Image (cartoon, rainbow, N blue to C red):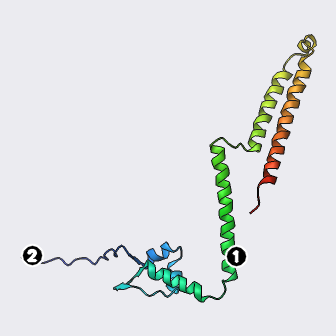
Amino acid sequence: MEKEKPESFQLSAPPSHLMDLETAARSFGVTRQAFHRWNITPVRAEGTRRLFDFAGVLDNRLQAARDSDTPDDSEIDRLQARIDLLREQIEHQRIRNEAQAAEYVHAGGAESALRAVMAGIGEIVSKIPDDLAGEFPKVQPAKELIEREIRRCIEALRAAELETLQSEPED
């Protein structure tokens, strides 16, 4: 006759509408210690494990918010800093999305590209022998015209970037 093996101790998964301390703390974005300090009454206890329902936790937090006469200044500052950070992240993501959709090209990148093109053109034109330039007197003015037009484009890019920065509303 075989002996029955004792079942190993395993915690069963809580019902889907209940959360253990770890899950509840994670759901509300706080540490276990902070959640414990909220003094929330558990709905059920299984051994040393306490189970909470979302409604009970939410009621506790709403009651705590109603009970506090004025919000803590540090809490307001923290929330304002978070709002500011989120706005910056949204703006950064908007610019990245526009750049990926090729609707927006950063002026610094375009300026670098134009400078590289100008250097390449200048190098090619400077290799033209002087005696060839003597035979074709329009070569030197053409070189100067090309360089002048590229400088004008770079200045236009800078002006457009400044105009864009000045026209953006500040939050």
Question: For this view, does 6 lie left or right of residue 108?
Answer: left
**Which residue ends up furthest to the left in the rendered image?**
1
Q: Give coordinates of residue 110: x percent, y percent.
A: 75, 39
Image position, residue 21 (x, y; %): 44, 79
In the foreground, 3 or 131 = 131
Q: What element carries label 1?
A: helix
Q: Identity of the amino acid at label 2?
A: Glu
Q: Name the residue under label 2.
A: 2
Q: Which residue is drawn at 89% across and 18% down?
A: 139
Left or right: 52 as drawn, with respect to 155: left
For the residues labelled 1 and 2, the Cα–Cα distance comes to: 68 Å
Near-viewer residue (50 or 88): 88
Element type at marker 2? loop
Q: Nearer the viewer, mark 1 or mark 2?
A: 1
**Which part of the image, by quadrant, shows the C terminus?**
bottom right
Residue at figure coordinates x 22%, y 77% from the top left: 7
Residue 163 percent coordinates (x, y): 82, 48
Q: Where is residue 47 in the image (x, y as percent from the top left)?
A: 33, 85
Circle 2 packing at 10 Å, graded few (<14), some (14-19), many (20+), is few
Q: Residues within 10 Å of mark 1 (few under 14, many from 20)?
A: few
Quarter of the figure that contains the N terminus: bottom left
Q: What residue type is labelled 1?
A: Asp
In the rendered image, which quarter is residue 46 located in? bottom left
Picture quadrant where residue 16 is located: bottom left
Identified at 50% across, 85% down, the residue is 60
Q: Mark 1 points at which residue?
A: 77
The answer to whether residue 86 is seen in the rendering is: yes
